[in-house]
């Protein structure tokens, strides 16, 4: 009996991840539920995206409940994707009952409040009018725009202090207080760990690469981070 949480796989046609297929066709099938906390894909340009058919098929074949939230890379996942995969889209900042413990689920990017430029970008691309305008463009144009944005982001990341891109204590404490929970699970920062402060516990799910695939597995008696590649 386990509930699984994953995030930040950043799958792309250029960087296939065999561990992801093995996970979805193996361990995930035996879980009670699977939560994908954003950035399953490196980029998702709309539900007319023709790539990732192996991942879509593997998600569709799962008979367990699968929940997915938008990340900062795949915020355009929509109703068609949900229908194709059988995944249920859930909002960021989503509270569940995890074996009797009220638990807040987030992607985690809204906790990085020191990154002012990113927060402004996030506000722009999450606007329904912006999304409608973007999705009205031909797929090839969307790909070019996304590549330009990704290139700019990579340059900015290299020139930005890592602490600025991490969560802030104030934002974390505010989330605990606002949602009246003592347990928080998120991804985004690529810094897998468990942080305990007083009665509050914050689990950070790890990112995936060719060498690592860190998930959070939760049971009635607790949670643990697991590296599937170990």
Image (cartoon, rainbow, N blue to C red):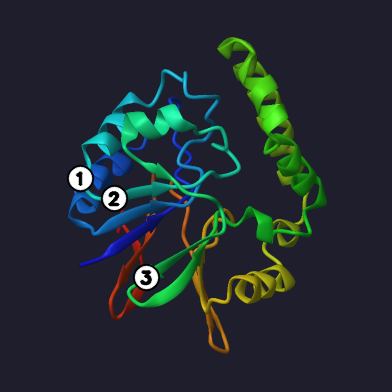
CB within 8 Å, label 2 to label 3: no
Q: What SS does tag 3 mark?
A: strand
- Answer left or right for 33 relative to 7: left
Asked if residue 151 is positioned above or below residue 109 in the image, the reply reads above
**Which mark, residue 65?**
2
Q: Position of residue 81 (x, y in %)?
A: 41, 30
Q: Quadrant of the N terminus?
A: bottom left
Which quadrant of the figure has residue 219?
A: bottom left
* Front residue of this view, candidates 138 and 211: 138
- Could you classify mark 1 by the number of other residues whose Cα lies within 10 Å: few (under 14), some (14-19), or many (20 or more)? some
The answer, for residue 164, to whether it is visible in the render is yes
Q: Position of residue 156 (x, y in %)?
A: 76, 41
User: What is the number of callouts on the image?
Assistant: 3
Q: What SS does tag 2 mark?
A: loop
Q: CA distance from mark 2 to mark 3?
A: 14 Å
Q: Residue at x 61, y 20 (%)?
A: 135
Q: Residue at x 33, y 24 (%)?
A: 53
CB within 8 Å, label 2 to label 1: no
Q: What SS does tag 1 mark?
A: loop
The answer to which of marks 3 and 1 sits earlier in the sequence is 1
* Front residue of this view, candidates 167 and 123: 123
The answer to which of marks 2 and 3 sits earlier in the sequence is 2
The answer, for residue 12, to whether it is visible in the render is no
Q: CA distance from mark 3 to mark 1?
A: 20 Å
- Answer left or right for 170 relative to 24: right
Query: Which residue is disc 1 drawn over?
Result: 63
**Which mark, residue 98?**
3
């Amino acid at each position: 009996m386990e509930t699984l949480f994953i995030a930040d796989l950043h799958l792309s046609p250029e960087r296939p991840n065999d561990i992801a297929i093995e996970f979805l066709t193996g361990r995930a099938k035996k879980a009670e539920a699977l939560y994908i906390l954003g950035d399953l894909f490196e980029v998702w340009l709309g539900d007319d995206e023709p790539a990732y058919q192996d991942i879509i098929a593997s998600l569709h074949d799962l008979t367990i409940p699968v929940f997915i939230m938008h990340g900062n890379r795949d915020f355009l996942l929509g109703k068609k994707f949900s229908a194709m995969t059988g995944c249920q889209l859930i909002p960021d900042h989503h509270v569940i009952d995890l074996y009797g413990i009220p638990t807040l689920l987030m992607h985690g990017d809204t906790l990085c409040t020191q990154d002012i430029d990113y927060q402004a970008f996030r506000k722009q691309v999450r606007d329904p009018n912006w999304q409608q305008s973007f999705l009205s463009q031909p797929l090839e144009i969307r790909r070019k725009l996304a590549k330009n944005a990704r290139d700019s982001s990579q340059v900015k990341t290299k020139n930005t202090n890592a602490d600025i891109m991490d969560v802030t204590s104030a934002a974390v404490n505010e989330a605990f207080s606002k949602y009246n929970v003592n347990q928080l699970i998120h991804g985004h920062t690529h810094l897998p760990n468990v942080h305990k402060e007083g009665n509050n516990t914050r689990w950070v799910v790890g990112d995936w690469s060719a060498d690592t695939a860190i998930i959070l597995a939760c049971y009635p008696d607790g949670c643990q981070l697991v590296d599937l590649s170990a």
